[in-house]
C-alpha cells in the first residue's frame, strides 16, 4: 500500500527526471554524436558500442534512485519507527512495497534509455541497431531498481543507527560512487573476471549490454575476438543472490530503525 | 490506557536529565500537562510514542509494554515527526496515514473542511504555515477510532477561531487524551480533565484542570499547600484559593515563573 504513494511521489520528483532521465539522455547523446567515431564500418562494432553505452547509462540511471531513497528513509526515520509500532505498516510490507515501486521505476528508466540509445545510435551509425532482447533489458532495469533500493536502505540505516547522521550526505551517495567506480573501470581499465562476476554493479551493467547486443559480451570488448566472453546466466544468478542477501539485511535493519533528529544531519 | 512508571530520559553527551522519575497513569480520562519551555513535555510524549530512548523505567499502553508493541492502532499523536514517511502533499499524507491506521480518510478530510483548511490539501506539508501544519497534525490525530490521543502543544500558532473549534473537538472526543501545553487560558474550559505541572523533567500533580483559577503558586513552602515543587531555581508550593501569584492570571508558565521568582 505504501508503495503506490512512494511511486507517485517519485514520479513527481523533479530530481529523478532531471538526474535519472535528462542528464542520462545527455550522455547517450554525447555517446552517439561525440564519442562514436573512427569505428570499423561493421554493424557489429556499432551495435556493441551502443550496447556498452546502454549498459553504463542504464546502470547509472538506476543508481540515481538510491539518493532519493536514502533521503526518504533519513527524513522518515522517526515516522518509520512510529509506523511500525502504531500503524499496520510492517517492515516486510515497507520493504516489499518499496521493492515493487523501485522495480517499476527501474523498468521505466531502462525502457527510456533503451529507446533513446536505439534511436540516437541508429541515427548516427546509419544501421538499424535494434536491441536484441528488450524484455531482458526491462527485467534488468527492474532488478537494478530493486538492488539500488536495498543497498541504499541498508547503508542509510547503518549510518542512522550506528555511525551517526553527520555523514548522511556521503552515505546517500555511496551507491552512486560504487556505480561509477565499477561501471567505468570495467569498460575503461578492465577488471579481473572474479570482480566482473562478483560485483552486482558489473552484473547489472553486463546484463544490460548482453540484452542489447544479443550475444555474450567479449571480455576485451572486441566483437570479432574469439577470447573469453562474459556469461550472463552466471551474472543473473549472482545478482539474484545479491538481491536476496540484501533483502534479508534490509529487513533486519529496517525493523530496528532508531528515531533520530534530522537536525543531526546538518553539515554546518 | 496508559501507564508510565518512573521513566528517566537523558539527552546528549552530557546525559542531561530530560525526564526524572516520571510516573503518570491515564485510565479513561483526559489530562493536561503544563510546564515552561524545555521542561520535558514533548520528551514525555516522544517517550510514550517510542521516539526517544528511555534510560530506565517502563511504559505500558493498553496493557502492552512499549518495547514490544507492534501495529497498535488505537494511539495517535500530533507530533509532526511521525508524518514524514514520504514526500507528499497534505491530501496524500492524510490518505496514506488513514490507510495505515485503517481509518476512513473522509473523516479527517471532513475536519479539514470544517476548519477551512481545504486550500492546504494540494500543498506539501512543508509549504504550509506553522499554524496550518500544527492544525493538520492535530486533525490527523483526532480520528474517532483513536482511543488514546497524545497532543503536543495543539494550540501553538493557531488563530482564535480555530482554537475555539479545536477546544470543542477535544472536549467532545471520547478518547483518552494527554495534552501538553504551556498556556493557561484554555485550561479553565477543560472540565473534568486532570492537570499536571512539569518542571525540569519532574511531574507534579494531579490537580483538576478547571480549578486552575483557584490555584496559586508561592515561593517556598506555605502552610496548607497541596503540592510542593523542588526545582533547580528554588522550592515552590501550590495552594488553593489564596497565595502569592494566581496561576490562571498568568498568560503561560514562563511568565508565571518569572512573576513568582
Image (spheres, coloured by chain):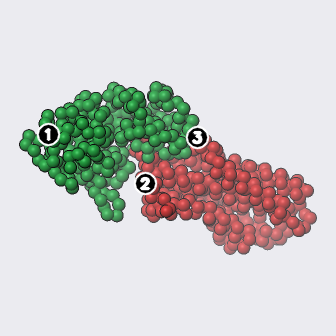
Chain colours: A red, B green
* Residue B27 x %, y %: 25, 35
Disc 1 secondary structure class: loop
Q: Is residue B247 visible?
A: yes
Residue holding disc 1: B243
Cα distance in 3D space between marks 3 and 2: 27 Å
Label 2 or label 1, whichever lies nearer to me, is: 1
Question: Which chain does the numbered disc 3 sit on?
Answer: A
| Residue located beneath label 3 in the image | A4
Gap between marks 1 and 3 measured at Cα: 60 Å
What kind of element bears circle 3?
Answer: helix
Q: Secondary structure at mark 2?
A: loop
Q: Which mark is residue A261?
A: 2
In percent of the image, x 27 and y 33: which residue is there?
Answer: B187
Tell me which corner region of the image, top left, top right, bottom left or bottom right, holds residue A62: bottom right
When the figure is inspected, residue B154 is found, relative to residue A99, above or below; the finding is above
The first of marks 3 and 2 along the sequence is 3
Relative height, residue B37 to residue A160 (above, below): above
Write the residue at 83% across / 63% down: A34
Out of B242 and A152, give the one closest to the viewer. Answer: B242
* Vertical order, B190 against B50 (above or below): above
Q: Chain of mark 2?
A: A
Report which quarter residue A125 is drawn in: bottom right
Camera-nearest residue between A10 and B218: B218
Q: Assess disc 1: are there few (<14), some (14-19) or many (≥20) residues with their C-alpha within 10 Å of its C-alpha.
A: some
Q: Chain of mark 1?
A: B
Picture residue at 72% right of the left edge, 61% below the top: A56
Please give left or right for residue B138 compared with residue A39 in the image: left
Amino acid at each position: 500500500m505504501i508503495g503506490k504513494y512512494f511511486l507517485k511521489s517519485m514520479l513527481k520528483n523533479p530530481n529523478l527526471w532531471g538526474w535519472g532521465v535528462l542528464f542520462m539522455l545527455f550522455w547517450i547523446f554525447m555517446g552517439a554524436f561525440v564519442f562514436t567515431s573512427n569505428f570499423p564500418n561493421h554493424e557489429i562494432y556499432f551495435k556493441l558500442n551502443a550496447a556498452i553505452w546502454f549498459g553504463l547509462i542504464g546502470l547509472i540511471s538506476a543508481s540515481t534512485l538510491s539518493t532519493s531513497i536514502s533521503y526518504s528513509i533519513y527524513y522518515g526515520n522517526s515516522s518509520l519507527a512510529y509506523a511500525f509500532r502504531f500503524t499496520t505498516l510492517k517492515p516486510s510490507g515497507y520493504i516489499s512495497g518499496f521493492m515493487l515501486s523501485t522495480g517499476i521505476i527501474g523498468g521505466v528508466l531502462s525502457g527510456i534509455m533503451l529507446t533513446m540509445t536505439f534511436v540516437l545510435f541508429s541515427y548516427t551509425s546509419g544501421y538499424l541497431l535494434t536491441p536484441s532482447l528488450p524484455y531482458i533489458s526491462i527485467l534488468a532495469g527492474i532488478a537494478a531498481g530493486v538492488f539500488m533500493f536495498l543497498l541504499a536502505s541498508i547503508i542509510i540505516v547503518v549510518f542512522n543507527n550506528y555511525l551517526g547522521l553527520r555523514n548522511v550526505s556521503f552515505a546517500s551517495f555511496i551507491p552512486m560512487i560504487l556505480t561509477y567506480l565499477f561501471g567505468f573501470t570495467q569498460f575503461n581499465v578492465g577488471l579481473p573476471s572474479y570482480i566482473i562476476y562478483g560485483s552486482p554493479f558489473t552484473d547489472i551493467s553486463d546484463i544490460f549490454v548482453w540484452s542489447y547486443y544479443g550475444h555474450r559480451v567479449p571480455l576485451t570488448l572486441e566483437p570479432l575476438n574469439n577470447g573469453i566472453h562474459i556469461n550472463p546466466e552466471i551474472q543473473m544468478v549472482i545478482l539474484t543472490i545479491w538481491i536476496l542477501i540484501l533483502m534479508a539485511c534490509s529487513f533486519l535493519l529496517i525493523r530496528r530503525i532508531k528515531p533520530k533528529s534530522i537536525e543531526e544531519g546538518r553539515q554546518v | 490506557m496508559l501507564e508510565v512508571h518512573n521513566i528517566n530520559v537523558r539527552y546528549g553527551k552530557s546525559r542531561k536529565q530530560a525526564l526524572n522519575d516520571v510516573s503518570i497513569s491515564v485510565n479513561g480520562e483526559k489530562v493536561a500537562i503544563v510546564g515552561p519551555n524545555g521542561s520535558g513535555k514533548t520528551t514525555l510524549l516522544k517517550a510514550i510514542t517510542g521516539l526517544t530512548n528511555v534510560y530506565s523505567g517502563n511504559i505500558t499502553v493498553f496493557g502492552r509494554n512499549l518495547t514490544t508493541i507492534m501495529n497498535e492502532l488505537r494511539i495517535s499523536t500530533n507530533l509532526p515527526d511521525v508524518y514524514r514517511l514520504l514526500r507528499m502533499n497534505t491530501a496524500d499524507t492524510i490518505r496514506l496515514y488513514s490507510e495505515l491506521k485503517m481509518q476512513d480518510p473522509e473523516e479527517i478530510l471532513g475536519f479539514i473542511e470544517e476548519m477551512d483548511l481545504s486550500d492546504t490539501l494540494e500543498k506539501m506539508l512543508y509549504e504550509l504555515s506553522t499554524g496550518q501544519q500544527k492544525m493538520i497534525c492535530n486533525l490527523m490525530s483526532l480520528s474517532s477510532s483513536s482511543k488514546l490521543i497524545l497532543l503536543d502543544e495543539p494550540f501553538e500558532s493557531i488563530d482564535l477561531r480555530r482554537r475555539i473549534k479545536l477546544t470543542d473537538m477535544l472536549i467532545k472526543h471520547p478518547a483518552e487524551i494527554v495534552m501538553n501545553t504551556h498556556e493557561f487560558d484554555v485550561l479553565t474550559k477543560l472540565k473534568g480533565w486532570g492537570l499536571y505541572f512539569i518542571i525540569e523533567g519532574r511531574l507534579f500533580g494531579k490537580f483538576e484542570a478547571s480549578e486552575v483559577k483557584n490555584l496559586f503558586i508561592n515561593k517556598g513552602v506555605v502552610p496548607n499547600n497541596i503540592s510542593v515543587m523542588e526545582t533547580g531555581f528554588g522550592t515552590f508550593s501550590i495552594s488553593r484559593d489564596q497565595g502569592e501569584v494566581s496561576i490562571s492570571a498568568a498568560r503561560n508558565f514562563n511568565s508565571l515563573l518569572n512573576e513568582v521568582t
